Amino acid sequence: MGKALIIGAGGVAGVAIHKCCQYSEVFEEIMIASRTKAKCDAFAEKLAGTTKTKIRTAKVDANNVDELIALIEEFKPDVVLNLALPYQDLTIMDACLATRTHYVDTANYEPEDTAKFEYSWQWAYRERFEQAGICAVLGSGFDPGVTGVFSAYALKHQFDEINYIDILDCNGGDHGYPFATNFNPEINIREVTANGSYWEDGHWVETAPMEIKREYDFKGVGPKDMYLLHHEELESLGLNIPGIKRIRFFMTFGQSYLTHLRCLQNVGMTSIEPIAFEGKQIVPLQFLKAVLPDPASLGPRTVGKTNIGCIFQGKKDGKDKTYYLYNICDHQECYREVGSQAISYTTGVPAMIGAALVITGKWCKPGVYNVEEFDPDPFMELLNKFGLPWHEDFNPVLVD
């Protein structure tokens, strides 16, 4: 049916590539492109003979708009699936604008020199994408992504209005390392060490990093400590879900992770400010990323499950209602299927689904949109089909 250009060759890209190849009736051809072509070639070689999807590979610098334009013009994809770094969102969007090509990503833009992420930079492209007649789907991962689709689904099928949303992200996996991150270390640590915030009564309430802690008993995982963080989907859901009074995001962390992180912060290793070292300028956090285990290598040693979902409170037919939508994902099952741990799996599957819905025209209209602005039903159907089945609880324990 169509062609997708996948930019990136990390853990999430690997899952998305496998899933595109499982959905050959939509993805007739894909091109995998990254700065290191050998990584792209490795995926193509691994999947050769297992799929009807034709796979091509290429080298590209995602920071270079001209290189991106040239590659898009040569391959002529129906959609560009951006699975590179969040720093590169805008250059890839610029290339899509220049070539009038649809765009999908999993995380919003972050300036490389500032630990801050918000949608304003990408929302600024709305009019230009609309005028070009092309669609950009922002945040088609799990959180953001599935959490937004869950919100749209809950509003469509369970509520007349939603007043409170608590997004709970639990990773109960154990990789055996004293300290490692389950996705890009640089992005993960920047996210965790930033101030927390939540959306309440139309404005942001800011907190110190890890200031607000709760314990929650997650089905399939058990009791875990979770901490309030800022997360980008709070921004879009606050605007797109009517009736909202408060949205919060919580993520679980083990004590070993927090202790190591605190030590690294204390000695300056999580800083993004360049320092002089042996006559060169280095960024401590980027150096730390280089010495930590590659998240893509954690698959074979990670055991346990994730549980990620949304607890909703609102009204239906004038009565108060609570509702919990969530997914449980097993690390080892993911590894057996696609060679990945569950964190990459839960992001890579929705990335493929977003691209598929653009290709098929089910999610495709001129402009720049977050996932909750589309019909959730076809996305929810494909979650069940491609490995992320969802569960419902109509009487959940609430977070205080």
Image (cartoon, grey):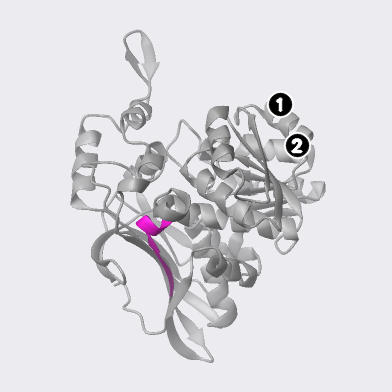
Q: Nearer the viewer, residue 26 or 362?
A: 26
- Which of the image's four quarters has the N terminus? bottom right
The answer to which of marks 2 and 1 sits earlier in the sequence is 1
Q: In which image quadrant can residue 218 be found?
A: bottom left
Numbered circle sitting on residue 66: 1
The outermost residue toward the front is: 49
Instruction: Based on the picture, tell me whether residue 45 belongs to the magenta stretch.
Output: no
- Classify 164 as above or below 22: below
Identify the residue at image location x=54%, y=28%: 38
Q: Nearer the viewer, residue 144 or 40?
A: 40
Instruction: Name the side, left or right, on which 383 lies relative to 346.
Output: right
The outermost residue toward the top is: 279
Q: Nearer the viewer, residue 95 or 294?
A: 294
Query: What's under tag 1, amino acid-wise?
Result: Asp
Q: Are marks 2 and 1 in contact (CB under 8 Å)?
A: no
Graded by Cα atoms within 10 Å as few (under 14), some (14 to 19) or many (20 or more), the crowding at tag 2 reads some
Q: Secondary structure at mark 2?
A: helix
Q: CA distance from mark 2 to mark 1?
A: 14 Å
Instruction: Tell me where the magenta segment starts and ends, as one range.
Output: 325-334
Identify the residue at image location x=72%, y=31%: 71
Residue at the disc numbered 2? 75
Q: In which image quadrant can residue 332 be found?
A: bottom left
Identify the residue at image location x=28%, y=66%: 221
Instruction: Based on the picture, tell me whether residue 332 belongs to the magenta stretch.
Output: yes
Graded by Cα atoms within 10 Å as few (under 14), some (14 to 19) or many (20 or more), the crowding at tag 1 reads some
The answer to whether residue 202 shows anywhere in this view is: yes
Identify the residue at image location x=33%, y=26%: 284
Numbered circle sitting on residue 38: none
Magenta: main secondary structure: strand
Q: Nearer the viewer, residue 184 or 12?
A: 12
- Percent across and percent down for residue 16 are 56, 50
- Percent across and percent down for residue 161 are 54, 79
